[in-house]
Image: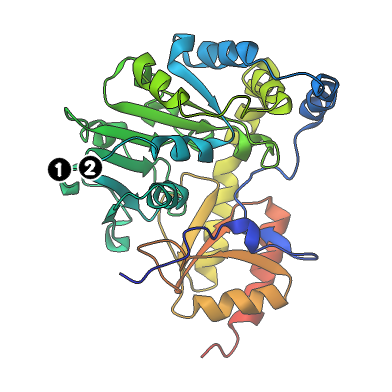
Amino acid sequence: MPEVDLRHHGDREIGDGLVDLAVNVQVPKPPPWLLDVLIAALAQAGGYPDQAAAVAAAARAHGCDPASVLLTNGAAEAFTLLARLPWRRPLVVHPQFTEPEAALRAAGHCVQRLVLSGDTGFRLDPDAVDPTADLVIVGNPTNPTSRLHPAEALAAMLRPGRLVVVDEAFMDVTDQRQSLAGLAPTTQGLLVVRSLTKTFGLAGVRAGHLLGEPALVARLAAYQPHWSVNALALAATVACLGPEGEAHRRAVTDGLPPRLSHLTRALLAAGLDVVAEPAGPFVLARHDRADVLRERLRHLGFALRRGDTFPGLGPQWLRVAARDEATTDALSHALPTALQELP
């Protein structure tokens, strides 16, 4: 399989004057009530951050012991901490968010890949996982395929001597019944990673957490630098996991299906193939000349996420964020021009 740039992410696609369909953060900035919280937290910038309230908020939200919670500097830090452990045969399920493999490689690990097929809609077969793998990392719903794997399929990968890590960065706006967050604190060999970045517009603040058995959480915490989660992220965590945050999450969740349907129809009408049943706030689409199409759309003012930096995909794939109806309509009007006389 050809090597790809695992450090390439959607933020490198955007630019001045471009409509951002490349980054999968669902709101362009924190909602007003959260901005007020962040501004107030600036008054605490002179002191060292205290995690107690944020840990308690996460524990309440997930119904677990605070010892099962580790706050992280965005979800990405969780993968860096995991890479510090002495794995023998780590495996990453692809296509998916590339930071887990990048972190493992940077730590000197030799990483196996289980590449799911577009012919099956990128569905996961637990039996396809190498039985010797002692670490398995998978996204649910997965970035960039938008595939939501059944909780039973993920749980079927559990076995003695193996840690299954489920990246649930987008789970808060989809079918909560497929989440393993409630099981992770009491299930040996299971770790769930969560992020507040996507739903609350906090990409620049970096607020995430992981859930697992206390002994495993303590082991990972031992590798974490002091004060890696800043005061703004801690205040945001408390607010996002509180009543106002829950109301915002529900509103985003309720609004996502019509946005996904509208975007899917627009892409299909333009002649692109779309991965069915998208569950995340984005759609993965295929076109034989997607690389040229993406550049043409860029000239027309739209930034889309290229697919060839995800293992298992290639230049014929594009990831498109599901924005509001007006933004999707504007893309729909631009697509025929971009596709005109496409070689």
The vertical placement of 307 against 129, above or below, is: below
Crowding at label 1, few (<14), some or many (≥20) Cα neighbours within 10 Å? Answer: few
The vertical placement of 245 against 318, above or below, is: above
What SS does tag 1 mark? loop
Crowding at label 2, few (<14), some or many (≥20) Cα neighbours within 10 Å? Answer: few
Judged left or right of residue 243, residue 47 is right
Image quarter of residue 114: bottom left
Disc number placed over residue 257 in the picture, else none: none
The residue closer to the viewer here, 188 or 292, is: 188
Residue at screen point 59% across, 74% down: 294
Q: CA distance from mark 1 to mark 2?
A: 9 Å
Which of discs 1 and 2 lies nearer the camera? The answer is: 2
The residue closer to the viewer here, 174 or 193, is: 193
List x then y, in percent, for residue 111. Answer: 30, 52
List x then y, in percent, for residue 109. Answer: 32, 49
- The residue at which mark 1 appears reads as 132
Residue at screen point 76% across, 41% down: 29
Judged left or right of residue 297, residue 98 is left
Identified by mark 2, the residue type is Arg
List x then y, in percent, for residue 187. Answer: 29, 19
The colour scheme applied to this rendered structure is rainbow
The vertical placement of 222 against 31, above or below, is: above
Task: Assess whether mark 2 and mark 1 are in contact (beta carbons under 8 angstroms).
Answer: yes
What SS does tag 2 mark? loop
Image quarter of residue 155: top left
Disc number placed over residue 88 in the picture, else none: 2
N-term-proximal mark, 1 vs 2: 2
